[in-house]
Image (cartoon, helix red, strand yellow):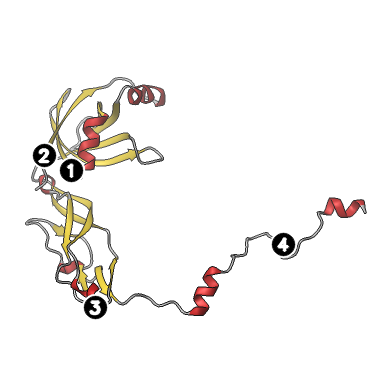
């Protein structure tokens, strides 16, 4: 189970783009807490704190300070460059409440099939899971130390933590070790040819205005 982080939050009375911009400039992040048919709370928390939690892949947190709640990070909004968190949505949950979440799939080890000329093809990089809020894994590690040439690991082959269920077709390919795709000379030449730009004239012609002056 992932480590449960505690976040210190404060209630906020101000809303709107200008108010939120001032919060971000001061090192804070605006957020909301909702769910369980209770009142929606507008809150704020330190950008550094929430950034650390998100980087570690944690979703279940304990909110303290202005409110005392257990919550699930439902959505995180980033800036255009993906460097700063702009807003966070928290949903009220209990530790044993079932939630659905998408987590990353990461490969571990070295496939022996690569020594026989195989190439690793990581097809599925994330999967949707269902489990208790407090048991959401940071990621799913896939051991490929046994992956031989022309072998495939499917979703149904994944070793998931106890109580975690994959919401994905078990036949979906996660990773395979297969022969590299060969490209024919004709395909290679076609790929190297300059693509035709839509709207470009095939021959250089005088602009209509220039032609009219002659």
**Disc 1 and disc 3: Cα gap in Å?**
39 Å
- Does label 4 or label 3 sit earlier along the sequence? 3
- The residue pinned by badge 3 equals 116
Q: Secondary structure at mark 4?
A: loop
Task: Label 2: state its secondary structure.
Answer: loop
Residues at marks 2 and 3, CA–CA distance in whole angstroms = 43 Å
The quadrant in which residue 148 appears is: bottom left
Residue indicated by mark 1:
58
Residue lying farthest top?
A: 13
Q: Is residue 81 visible?
A: yes
- What residue is at 17 percent from the left and 67 percent from the top? 144
Q: Secondary structure at mark 3?
A: helix
x then y, percent, for residue 81: 39, 41
Q: Position of residue 131 (x, y in %)?
A: 13, 52
- Residue 18 lies left or right of residue 117; in this view the side is right
Question: Which residue does the numbered mark 2 point to in the structure image?
Answer: 4
Verify CB contact (< 8 Å) between mark 1 and mark 2. Answer: yes
Between 73 and 180, the one lying in front of the other is: 180
In percent of width and height, residue 188 lies at 50, 74
Q: Which residue is mark 4?
A: 201
Quarter of the rendering occupied by the C terminus: bottom right
The residue that appears at 23% across and 67% down in the rendered structure is 169
Q: Earlier in the sequence, mark 1 or mark 2?
A: 2
Work out whether mark 4 precedes mark 1 in sequence or the reverse, and give the earlier one: 1
Distance from disc 4 to disc 3, alpha carbons, whole Å, reads 49 Å
């Amino acid at each position: 189970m992932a480590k449960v982080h505690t976040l210190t939050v404060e209630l906020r009375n101000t809303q709107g783009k200008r108010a939120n911009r001032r919060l971000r400039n001061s090192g804070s992040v605006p957020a909301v807490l909702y769910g369980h048919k209770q009142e929606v709370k507008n809150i704020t928390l330190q950008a550094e704190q929430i950034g650390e939690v998100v980087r570690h892949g944690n979703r279940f947190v304990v909110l303290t300070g202005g409110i005392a709640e257990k919550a699930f990070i439902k959505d995180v909004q980033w800036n255009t460059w993906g460097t700063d968190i702009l807003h966070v949505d928290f949903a009220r949950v209990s530790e044993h409440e079932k939630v659905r979440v998408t987590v990353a799939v990461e490969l571990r080890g070295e496939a022996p099939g690569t020594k026989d000329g195989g190439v690793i093809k990581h097809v599925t990089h994330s999967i949707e899971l269902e489990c208790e809020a407090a048991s959401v894994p940071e990621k799913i590690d896939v051991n490929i130390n046994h992956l031989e040439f022309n072998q495939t690991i499917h979703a149904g082959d994944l070793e998931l933590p106890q109580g975690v269920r994959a919401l994905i077709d078990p036949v979906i390919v996660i990773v395979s070790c297969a022969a590299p795709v060969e490209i024919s000379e004709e395909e290679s030449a076609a790929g190297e040819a300059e693509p035709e730009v839509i709207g470009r004239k095939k021959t250089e012609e005088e602009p209509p205005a220039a032609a009219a002056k002659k």
